[in-house]
Image (cartoon, helix red, strand yellow):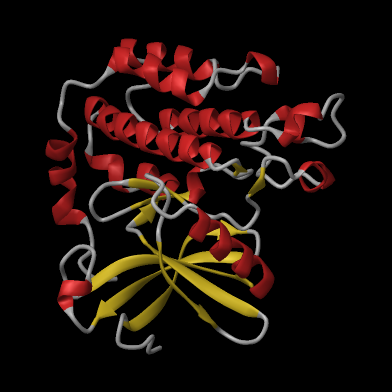
């Protein structure tokens, strides 16, 4: 519907980009009345829209406001109340990273996929470091919560379960992440949950996300892939106190910086990306 003079027309599709706790994340298109307002300098922008209950939406909007200016955090283009109980938040996006690696990247060779992997690994790592600098724990870092924009940037999204690091009771009350990516210490039934209130659980989930990307890319079994996987294993140590910091991981990753430029690889995609959904 109409969103006022600042935006224009928001159109939803029935195509899911991912599955959230409260329903699917859908793709859509945001049509700008003034093309100059468009972040990609055109009259319409592909976006991701998630619908959630009003309380969760209010919490997420508050967190996003606190993270304003942090690099790698998906900026909300806006939100709209659908009724008294639900709201929708929308972000600029072409796809979630899991769909991107499963579909769009089929036209790339292993070296080119590594160029994407390297750029997006750094961008999401920087985003989590920024999150930690504000004393927040995301608690649900995973491929579905990473959006790829039309410009080829990876951005972290989905902050409705994000809490301040000091919120011990809330963190220990229940396991909030996705089981495939959650750190062992986040399980309340586990032997030791002392560290689930800290940042280390996000480091683990970040490492598991990178392994997912590797498993869907052609460079995994290359010399570079084996070296990268060794660095990632430092993020996914079961003992939280032995887990590598993301800053250290990014420093280690510099030793396997790709030779090809990101822009050259991304240009290869542009003819395939939608101008409109």
Image position of 104 (left or right of 27): left
Residue at 37% across / 80% down in the picture?
11
Image position of 149 (left or right of 145): left
Quadrant that contains the N terminus: bottom left
Residue at 41% across / 77% down in the picture?
12
Quarter of the image for residue 266 reads: top left
The image position of residue 58, as x and y in percent, is 61, 69
Up/down of 143 relative to 259, above or below? below
The answer to which of 248 and 258 lies nearer the viewer is 248
The image position of residue 123, as x and y in percent, is 36, 37
The image position of residue 206, as x and y in percent, is 52, 33
Quarter of the image for residue 225 reads: top left
The answer to which of 198 and 187 lies nearer the viewer is 198
**How many numbered badges does the structure rendering display?**
0
The answer to which of 236 and 254 lies nearer the viewer is 254
Quadrant that contains the C terminus: bottom left
The answer to which of 186 and 272 lies nearer the viewer is 186
Residue at 54% across / 55% down in the picture?
158
Quarter of the image for residue 243 reads: top right
Residue at 52% across / 74% down in the picture?
88
Image position of 238 (left or right of 143): right
The image position of residue 134, as x and y in percent, is 54, 43
Up/down of 190 relative to 40, above or below? above
């Amino acid at each position: 519907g109409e969103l006022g003079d600042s935006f224009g027309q928001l159109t939803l599709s029935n195509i899911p980009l991912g599955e959230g706790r409260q329903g699917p994340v859908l793709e859509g298109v945001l049509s700008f009345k003034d093309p100059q307002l468009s972040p990609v300098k055109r009259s319409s922008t592909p976006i991701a829209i998630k619908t959630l209950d009003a309380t969760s939406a209010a919490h997420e909007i508050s967190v996003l406001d606190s993270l304003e200016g942090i690099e790698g955090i998906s900026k909300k283009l806006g939100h709209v109340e659908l009724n008294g109980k639900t709201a929708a938040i929308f972000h600029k996006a072409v796809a979630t990273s899991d769909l991107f690696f499963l579909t769009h990247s089929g036209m790339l060779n292993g070296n080119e996929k590594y160029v994407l992997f390297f750029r997006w690994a750094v961008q999401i790592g920087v985003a989590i470091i920024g999150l930690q600098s504000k004393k927040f724990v995301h608690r649900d870092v995973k491929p579905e919560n990473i959006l790829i924009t039309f410009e080829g940037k990876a951005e972290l999204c989905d902050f409705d379960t994000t809490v301040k690091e000091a919120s011990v009771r809330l963190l220990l009350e229940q396991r909030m992440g996705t089981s495939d990516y959650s750190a062992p210490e986040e399980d309340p039934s586990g032997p030791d949950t002392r560290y689930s209130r800290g940042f280390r659980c996000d480091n683990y989930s970040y490492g598991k996300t990178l392994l997912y990307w590797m498993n869907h890319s052609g460079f995994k079994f290359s010399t570079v892939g084996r070296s990268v996987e060794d660095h990632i294993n430092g993020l996914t140590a079961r003992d939280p106190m032995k887990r590598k910091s993301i800053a250290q991981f990014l420093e280690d990753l510099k030793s396997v910086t790709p030779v090809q430029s990101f822009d050259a690889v991304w240009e290869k995609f542009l003819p395939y990306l939608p101008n409109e959904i």
